[in-house]
Image (tube, rainbow, N blue to C red):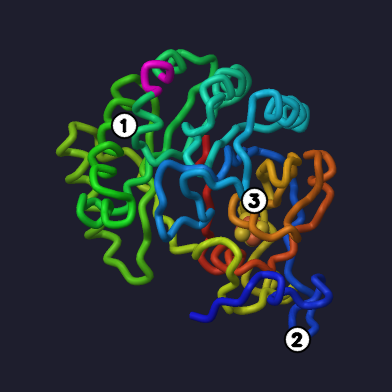
Amino acid sequence: MQHIPVKQAHSTNWLLTADGQPRGYIAPHSLQELWFHTGTACNLRCPFCLEGSKPGDDRLAVMKLKEVKPFIDEALYLGVQQFSFTGGEPFVAKEMIKILQYASQYRPCLVLSNGTAPLLQRFSQLVSLSSAPHAIRFRISIDYPDSTLHDKDRGTGSFAMALKSLRQLYQAGFNVSIARQQPREENTDDITDQYHKLLNSIGLPQTIPVIPFPDFAPPFVQHTTPQITEQCMRTYHTSASRRQFMCAFSKMVVKIKGRLRVYACTLVDDDPVYDLGSSLQESMNKQIRLGHHRCYSCFAFGASCSEGT
Ligand code: SF4
């Protein structure tokens, strides 16, 4: 697989593909879900991380409640249905509990976490949020249903801590799900069966959703994926399926170089082409051109970080 730095990969006219055809795009239709990137600081250093997160990383800065609040307020005005939080590790952010207290007053929330020490250390504070006006759900990363494979990249003990978080959150009354890695070739039935056995072994129901994610590659590289033209979008998608792309119904707020910015989705914050401005209202009027290599995953396989409320 060839890697090309993002800047070199852009053609001179972003509206066209490399061979001069109109580039495919998504026109946002609503703001159903607003994501916040809580920063690329993480307690773990996973080599596969699509955000390149690691201890002390500040590519995307940690957010504070006073920075998040105006976007929550604006999103409510625009009819948002859910607030979602990803990192890095959200519980590395000092104000994460306060942020969840604020957001969950208004809408259901989803938090993606590696389920290790930062979450467990704040568990007693989290428990108080189980009676928030709107439910808070947690998606815990358990890459494989096997401790050796999971701990190989995340570090010894990570698997045990993630299982402990999952069980404690569930027992405290929160809805939970699992994010797993999706190898290029897999026996999905067999993997699903292994997760069911794992859930059984810790006394949790098999109905807990397990959401697969393909390898999105680290930030700032561009896989050589097929170009997506307007013709492709008409041939292989319908108006209904175009509405299902994450960038059609969601946005993500990041803090980058000291400024709060709205990006097209959770997968493209390594490319300033997808910086849609400083306000949600402004971002809603902008078409999203499908030129990032991760856009091809959405186009071909329906990749999405979203999880309906
Ligand atoms: S990665 Fe997917 S959701 Fe994000 S901008 Fe590209 S097509 Fe849209």
Mark 3 sits near ligand 1, with its Cβ under 8 Å away: yes
At label 2, which amino acid type do we have?
Asp
Of the two numbered discs 3 and 2 on the same chain, state the one appearing first in sequence.
2
Left or right relative to 190: residue 72: right
Q: Nearer the viewer, residue 122 or 168?
A: 122
Q: Give me the residue at 58% from left, 41% from top.
A: 39
Rate crowding at label 1 as few (under 14), some (14 to 19) or many (20 or more) other CA atoms within 10 Å: many
Q: Position of residue 292 (x, y in %)?
A: 65, 66
Q: Looking at the image, in which quadrant does ligand 1 appear?
A: bottom right
**What's the residue type where badge 1 is placed?**
Ser
Q: Which residues are magenta?
A: 122-126
Residue placed under numbered mark 3 in the picture? 265
**Of helix, strand and loop, which one carries label 2?**
loop
Residue of label 1: 165
Label 2 environment density (alpha carbons within 10 Å; few <14, some 14–19, many ≥20) = few
Q: Which residue is mark 2?
A: 19
Q: How many marks?
A: 3
Q: Residue at x 70, y 46 (%)?
A: 256
**Outermost residue, bottom side:** 19
Where, by quadrant of the figure, is residue 231 drawn? bottom right
Does residue 306 show up?
Answer: no
CB contact under 8 Å: marks 1 and 2: no
Task: Give how far across and how far down residue 218 sits, in percent.
Answer: 51, 62
